[in-house]
Structures are given as C-alpha cells and as structure tokens.
Image (cartoon, grey):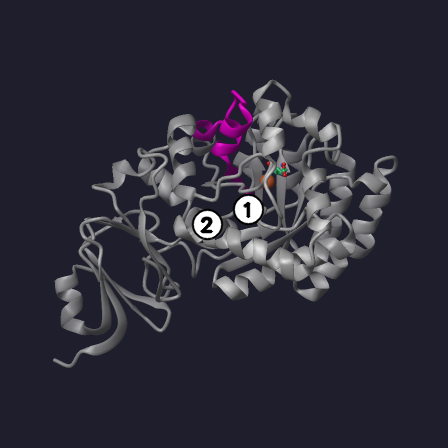
C-alpha cells in the first residue's frame, strides 16, 4: 500500500479531545496546515508517511485554544491600582477618578504605532505559551479615532509578526475620553461618523464592541453606536451586566450580536432574552476573582437554558492581567461550576463558533486548521484542577510546532 505524505504526526495522546468530545485513538495527522485525520496512530501510520513526529507522551491533545475576549492593545500594567484596590478602593471609583481605562489610554497615546505593535506582540506570545493559537483582539485604549485605528494597525502587525490568528474588534466605545467628559454624545458622534466607518472600510476590524455600564456608555448611546456598526456590516460583541443591569443584554440579543460578555449581574430578563436569541454568552470568571467581586455569571443556569457559553480571559491591564486560558479554566471550574470537558469545549469549539469561525478553528476534525496543544495532564479531569502551573507542553499552529 502506498503511503501519502503528511507534515506531522502527533501520537501517544492519553486523551484526544475534538473540541466537543473525546475521540477514539491517540493520534492526529496534519498536512498543508490542516487536520488530515485523527484516530489510533497505528492506523494513521498505515496511511500516512509523516515528515516529522511529535510524541504527546500520554498527555491530553486538544485543539489550539481560542480566546474570544481579549484587550491586547495596551502598553503597561496598572499595579498601582491593584494596590489601591487591595486597600479597599473599588474598580468603579478608580475609573470615575480618571484612573482605570483612562490611565491605559494615556500610556497608549504616548507610544508610536511600532512601539505599541511590539507590546501587543509580547502579549500574543504570552498567550500562546499558554496554548492560545487564535484570539479576538480589541482596540479601546486609544479613544481618538486616529489612536483607535493605530491600535488596530498595531494588532494587525503583531498578528503578522507572531503568527497569532486574530479576529480584530473596534472598541472605540470602551470609555468616554477625558476631552469629551462633559459631552459624551460628541464622542459617540465621532465614533458613528468617523471611527466605525473607518474601522469597517479599512478592513482593520471585523466587529465592534461597547462597554455598556454606568462608568462607560448608557443604553441610548450604546444603541446608537451598535446600530451604526451593524449598518456598516460589522459583527457586534458587547460588554454588559458586569456591575449594573442597564438592559445591555436585551439590546445585544435584539440586534443579533455575536456575543454579550461578563454577565456577573445577569437578571431573569437578560437570561430569558439570551435563551430565545442566538447571541453567545462570554463568561470571564477570572475578572470577578481579580476584582474581588463575589457574584459570578450564572453559568449553570445559562447552560441549562440552552445558551451557548464560551470562556475567555478578558486579558487586560485593569480587570484581568492574565493571558492564560488554562489558568482561567481553574476559575471556570471553581467559580462557575463547569466540568473539565465543558471548560475545554468553551475555550475551543464554542469560542470559535462565537467568532463565526467554527468551520475552521477550535476543532480537531479533518479540514480544520492544524492548531493543537499538548497538555501535560494525566487525564481530562485534571484540566483546571492545577493552577499556577502551565500544563501546555507543545503548541502547533497552522501545522507547524511553534512552542515546545
Ligand atoms: O472587560 N470592561 C471593560 N473593559 C475591560 C477592563 C478594561 C480595563 O480596566 O482596562 C473588561 O473588564
Ligand atoms: Fe473586556
């Protein structure tokens, strides 16, 4: 029998996880940047002649992780605020006093586009060491039209230099910038008249996002912004119900948003809307931990109501300086009550589906992109059990080994 050439054969998996379920066998054949076949490696060897091999040594082999809520366009951390919060100040107070997001804005405005791109590339590399091969990436720390576009260009440059597959999102409506503090509508005008059209027409963003919250944008302004984004053909992703219920969840569902994220305060009305709509729920359990918030998104109720939930880091300098999905998996299990299998599904196939990319990302099935991770875990149940230790021992992206 003639063997077909393939680029890489991964073998020796103790558990092979497709992104939705445990598969038969211990091996994956990859070629031309795609998954060719999964199954027992003895059988794969009867059909494929691999150019190279990777031994999973009994670990868990899963699709490359997809982080579907990330704010990577920042320059530096905000450890000073962390210290203030440890002494009792809260996140909203710090924001209202001109700190928070606005302090990250000052730092981003002080960098050239090239300098910012190097920062973003550093963030992408940190994420990939923890198994993330694709991510959503928001602007949101520029807050002038030009600085937001600079951030999106820096994200694109960092994607190119690191090989991270990026789904870019325009987040001009992250906060009201200092110069528009007395007249937030002027900033919403600028976003609707210039920012969103420029983001859509340049192709620098595929989606738009808004922070619907007392410290950011009210429901009317958010509606105006989201309707404009939708009219321009951008997908919608929304931050809502983190601290206050303002009706952002219902608005997101009404407008057919891809996802509405946070949901720590989600009420019955929002849950019913999500159950009836097609919008995914983005759950960010490490944020509640980092902010010392007692309430978590009602993950079990959402899942019981049939709402599709993904888990993401929300990696950002203010509310979650954590680039690691395996670390966040611990909080998903501990605080949200997810099983290991549900958690792994929520950071692979469901996260990819929420970005409209489930037909090529987040699944180890033939024809999908050849992105996978090898986790040094004795079985699936140990995923999210360990914390403070990176279980990722190898990362393959687009068919090539990028971390080992
Ligand atoms: O998702 N909520 C808005 N944005 C981020 C926090 C951004 C920051 O504090 O810098 C979040 O939590
Ligand atoms: Fe966020």
Q: Earlier in the sequence, mark 1 or mark 2?
A: 1
For the question of whether residue 45 can be seen, the reply is yes
Relative to 50, say whether 18 is above or below.
Answer: above
Residue 148, given in percent of the width and then of the height, sits at 71, 53
Quarter of the figure with residue 116: bottom right
According to the picture, the residue beneath numbered tag 1 turns out to be 70
For the question of whether residue 297 can be seen, the reply is no
Q: How many marks?
A: 2
Quarter of the figure with residue 249: top right
- The reply to whether the C-beta atoms of the residues labelled 1 and 2 are less than 8 Å apart is yes
In the picture provided, is 116 more to the left or to the right than 312? right
According to the picture, the residue beneath numbered tag 2 turns out to be 127
Q: Secondary structure at mark 1?
A: loop
Residue 172, given in percent of the width and then of the height, sits at 72, 48
Q: Residues within 10 Å of mark 1 (few under 14, many from 20)?
A: many
Check residue 277 for magenta coloring: no
Residue 212, given in percent of the width and then of the height, sits at 69, 35
Residue 215, given in percent of the width and then of the height, sits at 72, 30
Q: Nearer the viewer, residue 59 or 203?
A: 59
Give the number of the disc on residue 154. Answer: none
Q: Nearer the viewer, residue 316 or 227?
A: 316
Q: What residue is shown at x 40% (from left), y 38% (from top)?
A: 327
Q: Give the residues in magenta.
A: 278-301
Quarter that holds the N terminus: bottom left
Q: Residue furthest bottom?
A: 2
Q: Residues within 10 Å of mark 2 (few under 14, many from 20)?
A: many
Q: Secondary structure at mark 2?
A: helix
In the picture provided, is 165 more to the left or to the right than 9? right
Quarter that holds the C terminus: bottom left
Q: What residue is shown at x 50% (from left), y 36% (from top)?
A: 284
Q: Nearer the viewer, mark 1 or mark 2?
A: 2
């Amino acid at each position: 029998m003639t063997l077909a050439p393939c680029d890489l054969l991964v073998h020796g998996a103790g558990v092979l996880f497709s992104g939705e379920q445990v598969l038969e066998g211990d091996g994956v054949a990859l070629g031309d940047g795609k998954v060719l076949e999964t199954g027992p490696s003895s059988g794969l060897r009867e059909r494929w002649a691999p150019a190279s091999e990777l031994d999973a040594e009994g670990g868990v082999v899963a699709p490359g992780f997809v982080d579907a809520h990330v704010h990577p366009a920042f320059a530096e951390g905000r450890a000073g605020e962390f210290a203030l919060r440890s002494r009792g100040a809260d996140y909203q107070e710090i924001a209202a006093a001109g700190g928070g997001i606005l302090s990250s804005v000052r730092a981003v405005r002080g960098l050239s586009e090239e300098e910012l791109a190097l920062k973003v590339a550093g963030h992408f590399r940190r994420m990939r060491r923890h198994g993330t091969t694709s991510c959503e990436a928001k602007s949101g720390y520029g807050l002038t039209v030009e600085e937001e576009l600079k951030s999106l260009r820096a994200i694109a440059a960092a994607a190119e230099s690191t090989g991270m597959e990026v789904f870019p999102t325009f987040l001009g409506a992250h906060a009201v910038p200092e110069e528009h503090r007395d007249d937030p509508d002027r900033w919403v005008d600028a976003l609707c008249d210039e920012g969103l059209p420029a983001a859509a027409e340049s192709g620098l963003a595929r989606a738009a996002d808004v922070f619907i919250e007392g410290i950011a944008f009210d429901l009317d302004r958010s509606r105006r912004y989201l309707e404009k984004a939708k009219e321009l053909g951008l997908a919608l992703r929304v931050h809502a119900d983190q601290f206050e219920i303002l009706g952002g969840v219902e608005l997101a569902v009404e407008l057919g948003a891809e996802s509405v994220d946070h949901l720590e305060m989600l009420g019955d009305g929002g849950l019913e809307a999500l159950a009836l709509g097609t919008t995914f729920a983005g759950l960010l359990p490490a944020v509640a931990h980092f902010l010392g918030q007692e309430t978590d998104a009602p993950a079990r109720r959402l899942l019981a109501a049939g709402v599709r939930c993904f888990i993401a880091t929300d990696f950002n300098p203010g509310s979650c300086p954590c680039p690691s999905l395996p670390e966040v998996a611990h909080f998903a299990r501990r605080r949200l009550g997810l099983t290991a299998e549900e958690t792994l599904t929520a950071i692979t196939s469901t996260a990819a589906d929420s970005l409209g990319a489930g037909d090529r990302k987040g699944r180890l099935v033939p024809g999908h992109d050849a992105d996978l991770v090898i986790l040094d875990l004795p079985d699936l149940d140990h995923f999210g059990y360990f914390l403070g230790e990176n279980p990722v021992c190898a990362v393959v992206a687009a068919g090539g080994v990028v971390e080992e």
